[in-house]
Every structure is written in structure tokens, then in C-alpha cells.
Amino acid sequence: MKHFVLITGASEGLGKSFAIESAKMGMDLFLVALPDTGLPSLCSLINSNFGVFVDYLELDLTDDQSCIQLLDHVKSKSYPISFLINNAGVGGNYLFTNENFTTFNRMIQLNIKATTMITHGLLDVLQAQDTAFIINVSSIIAHFEGAYKQVYGATKSFVYYFSKSLQHELENTNVHVSVLSPGGINSNISHFRKCQQLNTISKLSILDPEFVASYAIQKCLQKKNQIIPGRLMRFYFLFSKILPDFVKYRLVKNTNVRIFKAQSTMQRT
């Protein structure tokens, strides 16, 4: 079966890798990303190199009307979407009391509301196909609470719970739901610079977006419910089940403090 995949946040980092990996597998594409982030160039590159159909919209999905516009566009074109990748998201490390609420509101709107609206709005399209798949991008941080990621971690916890619950609801249908919980990804130069502040073991867990995208698509097509890319991160996840809470807290705190300091330094330069 040839899939038609819709990918949000597709212009850079993990989303861009999802787009290229999907094209390599012969999937047609409908890509969504913010304006002026290079999406038309990416579409041209994919079309010329892989010969698949590509369409795109440049939208800010923190706006409800943009989500509605996306859904209307797909249905007006009668695109047979059979693979939905809810990748668009925003993160960061912030001291809650010092940060403007606008930052957190954008996080909630994109990571939670847009993901929910798009999934809900496209479910009838997905169910109309012979077989369909959804990947919702959560984060390993959803399983490790800690300072400076209070709102981001909460939004990714929502994505995790939403995805797992929706899969139970759809288990006897043609739609399979996977939740992707990656650790650190070298998705752009900013993330790369922040990751350089981590200790040696933490650095080893950082993955390239190309690997994460390829691994996630393969595992989703194999109908894996939870996808954690990288052997070291899977070991962390399993080992964390037997660690006392105070040990996990200390490990997460040390990592988050390093990243928070790196981010603060980068913002001042």
C-alpha cells in the first residue's frame, strides 16, 4: 500500500527528516510548517529527488484558525491521508516564575491543542483508508519530571497519555497509533550547542534526526505502540523503573540545570 503522509513541523529538524525518510519510502507528502522556514525549497528538493507528490501549507498552528484551514485544505483536495505525523512542537527550558506566560501558552497551544485538533479533524479521513497510522511525538522527558521543563514536560505527558488512550480506543479499527518518545536530538544548531554542555554519558544518548525519523516510521508500520529510539535511551527508560525517585530527581535536575544554563548563555550572546 502506498501511503499519503501529512507531517507537521516539517521544515527542519525531526520534521524535515520525517519528510525525507517518507519520500525515500515512496510516500506522497503533505507538509506543514511555519512561514519563511524553507518549506517550498524542501518540497522542490523532495520532488526532484524522489519523484513523489508533494503539497504544502505554511501556517502557524498555535492559531486555531490555521488548524481549521489545514483540515479544510486536506478535505477540499480529497487527499487520502493514511499516515499522520504530529511532529510540530515547541520546547525549551524556563524558570517558571521569570518567564512570560506567552511562552507557555504557545507551548500548550501547539503541543496539546493543535495535536488534538488535527488528529480529531483527520480521523474520518484516516478511517476511510485500508490501513492508517498516526505518530504523535512526545518526549522521554514525560517520564522524568524535573525543574525548568515544567510546562514542556506536562504537554508531552499529555501527548503520551492521549496517544496511548487513543490507541486503546482504536485497537479494533484500521488506524494504529504510536507515540514517539525520543531523548535529545541534534535537530538544529541551537540544540547541538546546548547538548555540548551535557556530561559524556548524556551526550552519548543524543541522536541524529535522520535516525530517529527512520526508526520511528519503521516501528510504527510494525504497529509498535511506544517507540523509544536509541539503545541507551531504552536502557535509561527501563532502568528508571527500578531507581528510587530521589535518584531520578537528582539525575534529571543535573541535566536540566546544565541545559538551562546553556540556553540562558545563548540568549545573552
Image: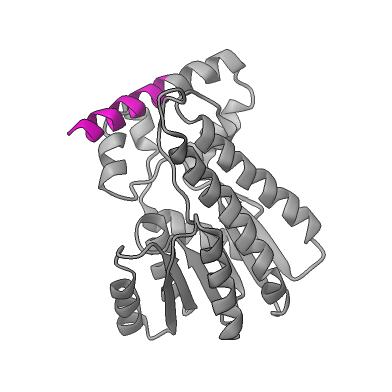
Camera-nearest residue between 11 and 131: 11
- Quadrant containing the C terminus is top left
Please tell me which residue is depicted at 63% across the width and 67% down the height of the picture: 133
**In magenta segment, residue 131:** no
Camera-nearest residue between 89 and 4: 89
Compared with 93, 46 (above or below) is below
Please tell me which residue is depicted at 48% across the width and 75% down the height of the picture: 30
Camera-nearest residue between 99 and 139: 99
In the image, which residues are magenta? 254-269
The total number of labels drawn is 0
Q: Quadrant of residue 19?
A: bottom left
Please tell me which residue is depicted at 59% across the width and 84% down the height of the picture: 76
Question: Where residue 137 sits: x, y (%)?
Answer: 54, 52
- Quadrant containing the N terminus is bottom right
> Is the image coloured rainbow, by chain, by secondary structure, or in one colour?
one colour
**In magenta segment, residue 268:** yes
Question: Where residue 153 sits: x, y (%)?
Answer: 54, 35
